Every structure is written in C-alpha cells, then in structure tokens.
Image: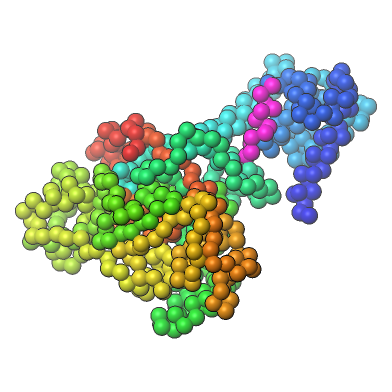
Amino acid sequence: MSIPLLILIATVVAIFASLWKLFQKAGRAAWEGAVPGYNFFVWQKITDRPWYWILILIIPGVQFLMLIIMNVNLAWSFGKRGTSNTLLAIFAPFYLLPKMAFSDDVQYTGNLDWKKEKGKGGGREWADALLFAIIVAFIVRTFIFEAFTIPTGSMEKSMLVGDYLFVSKARYGAKLPETPLSFPLTHHTFPIIGIPSFLEWQKIGYHRLPGWAEVELADPVVFNYPLGDTVVVQNEVRSWYQYKRDAAMQMAKTPDEFQKNPSKYLADAGSYLMRSPQYDITIRPKDKKENYVKRCVGMPGTTLEIKNGTLTIDGNELNPIPGLQHAYIVFTNKTVTKTMQNELKEDIGLNIKDIVDGRGKAYVMILTDEQRDQMQAQPFVDSLAVNWAPKKVDWANKLSIFPNDPNYDWSIDNFGPMWIPAKGASLDLTLENLPVYRRAIEAYEGKSVGVKDGQILIDGVAADSYTFTLDYYWMMGDNRHQSQDSRYFGFVPEDHVVGRPSFVWLSLDNECGWFDGKVRWSRMFRGVK
C-alpha cells in the first residue's frame, strides 16, 4: 500500500473519529458526527459556510480541494488560525483534527469575523475567495465549456491557426475526470516547470453525464489523442508507437528483413527506447492525453473507403464540406515572389505558409476547390493537379498509415474499405483483419490479444469473433494533406470524445502584424461549422 494512500485513509479515519467530539464542543449532538452525509451538513453549519459546499464536495476533481478548504475552516472555527495550524489543516489533518477534538484547551470559537482580525482578515478573505473562484472555474472548465486554441492548419478553412474558441463539453455530455487528483485549470503539465500536474493515486472508470446531442456525421469534434497514452516529449509531442516503428525499421535495416519477424523487431525497439536516456517517454492516463480537433467523417457501424481523395460511407459520397482543402502541384511560368504571395493572400485568402517552393517553377499549394479555380485563372499558372497517393506499403514513412502493418497498402488518398466498430456489434475476427481492430480491443476495451498456432486468443481464450463494448468514430482534418488524423492513429473510441467546438471568440493571423490585419474581426463570435 502506497504512502499517499495511507495518508488518505488516515485522514478519512481521523475525520470520522473526531467529528462527534468537535460537534459536542460546538453545542451539537455527538450522534450527528456519526451519520455520513448529514455530518458534512452540520460541519458547514458550525463553520458558517454555505450549504452548497457539500454538493461541490462530491464533484470529482475538486472534492479534495474542497475538503482541504473545509478542514481549514474547521480549524479556524476552533481557534487554530495561525500559519502553522493552517498548514497542518492542509497537509496533516489526520494529526490536527484529533488533537482539536480531544484536547481540553481547544474550544469552539466560531468561524472568523474577517473585519475583526486586526487587519489580517482582508488577505485571508481574498485567499478564501480565490480558492472558491478556482473551484468554480474548474467546474465550468470540466463540465460546461473549455477554451481551446487551434495550433495547426489541419482543419483549415473551417478553423484557422490562431482561432481561439470555446468547446462545449455539455453538448455530448461531460466526462467525469478519470484522474481527479490534478491541479485545477491545467491539463497534464504545469506551465514553465514542465512536470505532471496530476496524480494517479485515485482513478475512476469512464462515466459521462447526459448531454443533449450525439456525435453526428460531419461534426467537428475535440477528442483525446488516441495514441497519447505513451508519447515522446522533445521539441514537440510525438507518438511513441511511431518512434518504435522507426527504431524497429532501423534495426531490421531492410523492409524484407523487418517483414520476416516484425513482432521481434518492434519488441526490441521498444526495449531500446525505454532504456535510452535521450528519449523523454511520458505515459499519460486517458483524460490527460493531448486534445485534438478534427471532423467526424465515419460513424459506428458504417464502412468507410477513400478512392483518390473521395471519401464514401457505405458506398455514398460524404456531403461536401465547405472549405475542404487538398495539396496541389502548381506549375508556373515565373517565380512566385514575396509580393505575389502577399497578393494571393489578400485576393483569394491563400496563406503564405501554404505556398511551398518545389522544384524551379513548381509549387505545392494548399487550396480549396474555390481557390483552385481562382489559382487556375492566374496568368502565371500553367497548370495544376492533385498528386493522389496510390495504394502501396509505405516503407519510406515507416508504416505510418493505419493499421501500420506491412500487409496493408493503404495510403492517405486510397484507404479501405474498412468497417468502423459499433457498441454491441460483433465482428468475425481473422488473422487478416486483426491488425485493424487489435488496438481497439487491447488498448480501448482492455482485453489481451494474442496469436498462437494460427489461432486468435482474447484473454487467453480462442476466439473467432468479438463483440465491441464501445462506439468508435473516424476523424479527419478538412486540410486533407496536412492533417495527422485517423488515417494515422486509427479509431477514436467514444470515451475519448471531449466536446464540440462552439464558437470563435478571438482569431489572430500570425502572418500579419498588429496594425496590418492581425485580428480577424470577421471571424470573432462566429459559430463553428
């Protein structure tokens, strides 16, 4: 048993062993301290605190902070008001509370009257108010909405780099924190110092509050990065699994050698990376994974396929998405100068960063259908076309395309067909389709999967089918050739869904100066589609 857990148990025991005596000293009946739930109500009465603090005490993620505040107020109500006693109430209530209860010289004084505290009450009152404000902010951020920033261009033109928006967590039903012991208003890391802002002493399972809508096809969705359970943190956060594939391919030296025994090379690569001090490998619980935003283009129980960039669901082409972008090779009869780039940005809304010099007078440009037609009409453009990625086993990119298996030749533009798992639906498992569904069964549904003598084993039992317990979604960026999405990391389970972007409250163009159109006024306070 860990020391933190022992401290928590000691605190709970001390509270219930002491309350009856403290209540007696405060003029209440001793039995009131022995009735779970009701004793907290009396606790609030004798400390002169609002009754609704009891409701906050049952909210995962803030209950421990709330309990600390209640312990401090209890100590103050029995005259333990100095700095040392306040620290004991915060860090060692298992010692202070019994001492208060069973020491004859400790008497009930009532809670602080801030105005009579010789000038010291103002600071303490502000501290009390600040703590409560943090709790309220935490509740809003966890259960109602959260601010989110668009860091990359994967969703342009729907959501732009520099968009600051609010994500509705209540729409699909807010998730209860699965690692509730965390510092308020942080996600997984303390700013500046870079250490984890959460503790894994307590974990609860996946639970979601009721919402008023379900995830629908074409919804923009914020979700936890599915491969974010293990990441390599260097200049940027990258998937540990891709690092492992890279290392395995290097160990094998050739694709043919790797394909002889991929499991061995992957296992050896994993062991090497874990031992190597140059890699900062971080393991995170589900609710502390990085947040991504993409568009839901595949629903549970449907079959998805991409042919030359055209996505179909159950054979039907997805309805047009306004602002959908692809990478075009643009052949020009002259060099595109900086002045021309600025003109293209002003005239047709083409970002400067989306113009990449290729070879000579060939450029790669990220264009919507409308921008493609406008670019074709430019006098310096000879021709343009999309270079669709054909189906092939992509050894050059270390099998980065899902399901990251040498037996699959899918590419970002030619992918599938592939069935998306649905809750309660059964799938016939074969050695051929196992690579597609193995991670979902293992990582998201918590089963062990193995293969022995050509037979698939689930939790050690031979199986030729599997019934899924979660719904899964397929998420893709609107900027189809500049997006790390489900084509790389696979299915997004329902318990990873965070919320839906609601509206943009601020939009800044980092290609412009403050006096040269940096603020995109036309995007502010607009809904997200």
Among the 4 quarters of the image, the one containing residue 139: top right
From this viewpoint, which residue is outermost toward the left?
Answer: 379
Q: Start and end of the magenta stretch?
A: 51-62
Nearer the observer, 447 or 88:
447
Left/right placement of residue 335 relative to residue 387 reads left
Decide whether residue 58 is among the magenta residues: yes
Nearer the observer, 247 or 442:
442
Residue 153: x and y in percent read 33, 50
Q: Can see residue 131?
A: yes
Decide whether residue 528 is among the magenta residues: no
In the displayed structure, 526 sits above or below 251; it is above
Nearer the observer, 44 or 178:
178
Residue 118: x and y in percent read 72, 18
Predominant SS along the magenta part = loop
Left/right placement of residue 432 relative to residue 81 reads left
Left/right placement of residue 166 relative to residue 27 reads left
User: Residue at image x 6%, y 53%?
Assistant: 379
User: Residue at image x 41%, y 74%?
Assistant: 406
Q: Can see residue 123?
A: no
In the displayed structure, 245 sits above or below 349; it is below
Residue 457: x and y in percent read 59, 69
From this viewpoint, which residue is outermost toward the right?
Answer: 104
User: Residue at image x 53%, y 48%?
Assistant: 495
